[in-house]
Amino acid sequence: MAIVVHMDTIHRTMWGPFRKIVIMDARGSLHIIKVWGDLLNKNALRWALAKEDYGIIIGTMFRRFRRQEFLESSDHTAIHFNPFHHNAHYFGPIQKALVARNNRQFAVTFLEEQRRR
């Protein structure tokens, strides 16, 4: 469970389009998830709204890449937007602070630092 903080541009490879998304967990740590074609296309509007509203997502069945330090979607990945979950209330104060700040530069900097590695 995490908050969508930033979405990178769509990149295209021979395996299809993907987008890197920066998320923040309940501890305030930033992570990158790499979401491939079908999950981007099926949920395009939801992704856009999640970015604007700092929406909460829950994802299951991601693959972890240790070398590149990110999670990647697979054919079995499921993502739920703004879920009705008993732990969702922990993200309320974080969402309010992010909306009040309205500056995503910290997420862009984090993404650029990860690219340099």
Image (tube, helix red, strand yellow):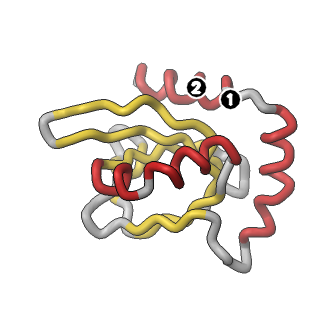
Location of the C terminus by quadrant is top left
User: Could you tell me residue 39's position as x and y percent?
Assistant: 36, 56
Which residue lies at the image location 29% right of the left edge and 69% below the top edge?
76
Q: Give the amino acid at mark 2.
A: Val
User: Could you tell me residue 63's position as x and y percent?
Assistant: 33, 58
Which residue lies at the image location 26% right of the left edge and 39% below the top edge?
17
Q: Are marks 1 and 2 in contact (CB under 8 Å)?
A: yes
User: Could you tell me residue 38's position as x and y percent?
Assistant: 29, 55
Q: How crowded is mark 2: few (under 14 residues within 10 Å), some or many (20 or more)?
A: some
Q: Residues within 10 Å of mark 1 (few under 14, many from 20)?
A: few
Location of the N terminus by quadrant is bottom right
Residue 11, above or below 94: above
Is residue 32 visible in this depiction of the protein? yes
Which residue lies at the image location 32% right of the left edge and 41% below the top edge?
18
User: Could you tell me residue 15's position as x and y percent?
Assistant: 15, 42
Q: What element carries label 1?
A: loop
Is residue 64 visible in this depiction of the protein? no
Q: Give the amino acid at mark 1.
A: Arg
Which residue lies at the image location 35% right of the left edge and 66% below the top edge?
77
Residue 13, above or below 43: above
Task: Identify the residue at the far left of this view.
Answer: 14
Q: Does residue 117 appear to the left or right of 12 in the view shown?
A: right
Q: In which quarter of the image is residue 104?
A: top right
Task: Identify the residue at the far front of this view.
Answer: 45
Out of 4 and 67, give the one closest to the viewer: 4
Q: Name the residue under label 2.
A: 108
Q: Name the residue under label 1.
A: 104
